[in-house]
Amino acid sequence: MTLVMFDMDGTLIDTQALISEHMAATFAGAGLPEPTAAESRRVIGLSLPVALARLAKRDDAGLIERLVESYKSHYRASVVTDNGREGMFPGALDALERLRLWPDTQLGIATGKGLNGVQRILALHRIESYFVTLQTPDHNPSKPHPGMMHRAMSETGAVASDTIMVGDTTFDIEMGKAAGAKAIGVAWGYHEPHELVAAGADIVITNYSELDAAIHTVLEAGDA
């Protein structure tokens, strides 16, 4: 059985502008220098407390907790005011439609986004039924720790050699490889292709039409 795990932000869903705006508003509200869009882009994929601590360059637990609550407040408000700004990347839905029909193949999510946000976005795009396992920081360590992958494999009965992580950041690739799985990088997300390769990506694809062949390639390489 093959298990294909997908990151969400930057891989399936295009939320870069929205997240960057939330980060800037969060830091401005706390009287801290606003991170640039490029700086915010670098931490997308990490769990929220880890991402905010990295941007703040501080180890102050109280401050980070306040920033987390502020960010969540901006996020909740955007659910109402920014409808339509969490679209799927071109070809993502078609790729999921194809893969879920593959025999002996299951799909899952491994993301830095909280579970409530994941469930809301899956419902928004009507793709809840596509995924058999949802892994988030609610019950796992932040990427690049392999905990999300280990839990997904345990839940589905998949083995590492038949499991693939598909993601756009070095955190995704490092997480997948740390779990002993294959890793496919996507070039349209938040980290550069050469960074994904350096992190251990087996293949980097430039659009979703290449995903099916990439999955076959990495699985066959494992069997060689």
Image (spheres, grey):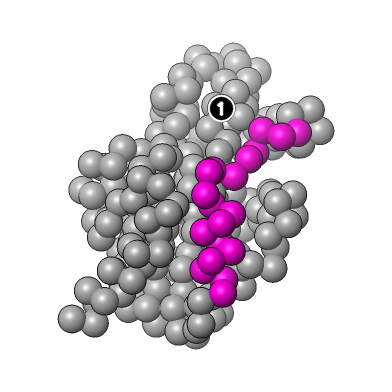
* Nearest to the observer: residue 81 or residue 74: 81
The secondary structure type at the circle numbered 1 is: helix
Residue at 27 percent across and 57 percent down: it is 203
In the displayed structure image, the side of residue 107 where residue 187 appears, left or right: left
Residue at 60 percent across and 23 percent down: it is 21
- Is residue 61 at least partly visible in the picture? no
What is the quadrant of the C terminus in the image?
bottom left
Q: Quadrant of residue 206?
A: top left
Looking at the image, residue 130 lies above or below residue 124: below
Residue at 42 percent across and 26 percent down: it is 39
**Mark 1: amino acid:** Ala
* Nearest to the observer: residue 90 or residue 69: 90
Q: Is residue 99 magenta?
A: yes
Location of residue 78 in the rendering, given as x and y in whole percent from the top left corner: 74, 31
Location of residue 98 in the rendering, given as x and y in whole percent from the top left corner: 53, 66
Q: Is residue 16 magenta?
A: no
Residue at 51 percent across and 82 percent down: it is 103
Residue for badge 1: 17
- Is residue 56 at least partly visible in the picture? yes
Q: Please provide the residue range marked out in magenta.
A: 83-101
Location of residue 23 in the rendering, given as x and y in whole percent from the top left corner: 57, 27
